[in-house]
Amino acid sequence: MENVTKADGMGKGPANHVALTPLSHLARARDVFADRVALIYGEIRLTYAEYAARIDRLAHALTLAGVGRGDVVATILPNVPAQSEAAFAIPACGAVLNTINTRLDPDTIAYILDHGGARVAIIDSQLVPLIQQAVAMMTTPAPRIIEVPDPTADVPASGMFETYDDFMARGQAGFDWVWPADEWDDLALNYTSGTTGRPKGVVYHHRGAYLMTMGTPISWRMTLFPVVLQIVPLFHCNGWCHTWMTPLLGGTVVCCRDITAAAIYDAIADHGVTHFGGAPIVLNLIVTAKDAARRPFDHTVEVFTAGAPPAAATLAAIEKLGFNVTQVYGLTETYGHVTECIWSDAWNDLPEDERATIKARQGVGFAIMDGVAVVGPDMQPVPRDGQTQGEIVMRGNAVMKGYLKNPEATAAAFDGGWFHSGDLAVQHPDGYIQIVDRAKDIIISGGENISSVEVESALMHHPAVSLCAVVAKPDDTWGEVPAAFVELRDGAEATAQEIIAFARSRLAGFKCPKQVIFGELPKTSTGKIQKFALRQQAAAL
């Protein structure tokens, strides 16, 4: 049959073509699941009708404040109700959501606010001193600051800025949302941790987030009415899109401000949590929890873990406690997880350590991806022998639009028609991918990406440092931590404690080296530092 055309009366129209957006999940849930609980935090319980009404008011208040289509609104919040509400309300007024890592230093936050051009910033009251320092460093007009006190966590308002509830009170329930004109419209702006010092602004579109929310329930074996614990920070790939996904299934999100073993066990026992995502450090918290923190529960909790392969011993231990862990993999540029280690029943009878080793693989592409492959320099797939290394590349709708104001980096990332992850991996005979190295020298510590270049740049400012290199050191708790190898200037002296303290004065705490080793750095004949040798040395420490 020949292709039909508009002349045949079969063109796109409002009856058969609507822009895909995760906003549609909440628009449906407010009607279909109106009386079901949408959000829990402490004593707070919001039904879908109440949740959507608050989001209406916030979206309307932002509109009254002059925020319009395409404007950026930033948040610097832990996983509290305001962060979940902002995830819907900011795009519902046509704006772009920019969640900022609460653990960043003022200089980096100032850069993000300048680069992204945020009109409004919604800030946790505990972080008011941080935002004041950042604003003082900005080179463009500062955003309007709205602060969010948290009585549940005993965090009072500072009195410096208008509060979130007062600001929201300006808006009205029933506000007519500003729907995307095109599903390619900007939805969110997320900044990477930066592999060359400054972070890059990753732009998400509505279509990609929508498809991620549709694909995740398939991979996570979800049914109606899940209870999803917000462990993954909502500033990490928008919480892997889980908050946008939950209304699709009429589920409940349980906010978790402070990630502790007791908080996790309490949420499972008190609220029947069925699913959560988290870095391997979260798994370790659960396994090593004191008896006083543990609470009994009678169902299996499904866990997505990513950030670094969890230790085999951790996986073996956590399964016995009632948790089923699935390894996933992705990047900020891919809306979070886009591969999964689908389990085969054929592996059930393998020895425990072999099962755990397989579970730690990054696996195969999500159903929503067009392709995930391991390729060589010629962009051809490497042999599926579990030994030949190549780069993980991927393509599909769950890939970013590009890097904000950085066409060169965008072109490089999309070279050859695939998104280049920069991660080195092998592919096993069954097609499962397994990461073996990180080509960009990123250190992943507790789920946080740390640029070795950024840390090295900070240390090089110390007057006693002649040369330095920072690599990942394996760590039982955090997965990896930064280790610094330092050559001192002739005649100069410094202690490890002094170097670490100096780093803390310039960087967020989690980026600072946990160990400093002094001595001459190994170099090639052209003077390049041999980081592979330092990684081997760090692993042996």
Image (cartoon, rainbow, N blue to C red):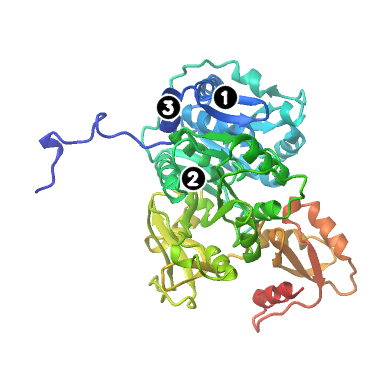
**Residue wearing tag 2:** 203
Please give the count of numbered marks on the rendered protein. 3
Q: Is mark 2 on a helix, strand or loop?
A: strand
Q: Is residue 134 above or below residue 424?
A: above
Task: Residue 286: give its label.
Answer: none
Say which quarter of the image contains residue 309.
bottom right
At horizontal 61% and vertical 55% (from top left) the residue drawn is 194
Which mark's residue is nearer the viewer, 2 or 1? 1
Q: Earlier in the sequence, mark 2 or mark 3?
A: 3
Task: Residue 46: give its label.
Answer: 1
425 sits left or right of 449 in the view: left
Q: Earlier in the sequence, mark 1 or mark 3?
A: 3
Q: Do the residues labelled 2 and 1 touch (CB within 8 Å)?
A: no
Residue 208 in the image, given as x and y percentages of width and height: 42, 45
Packing grade of label 2 (10 A; few <14, some 14-19, many >=20) is many
Q: Do the residues labelled 1 and 3 touch (CB within 8 Å)?
A: no
**Residue wearing tag 3:** 27
| Residue positioned most to the bottom | 525
Q: Earlier in the sequence, mark 2 or mark 1?
A: 1
Residue 528 appears in view: no
| Residue positioned most to the left | 1
Residue 196 in the image, given as x and y percentages of width and height: 61, 59
Q: Distance between the residues labelled 2 and 1?
A: 30 Å
Q: What residue type is labelled 1?
A: Leu
Residue 438 in the image, given as x and y percentages of width and height: 58, 66
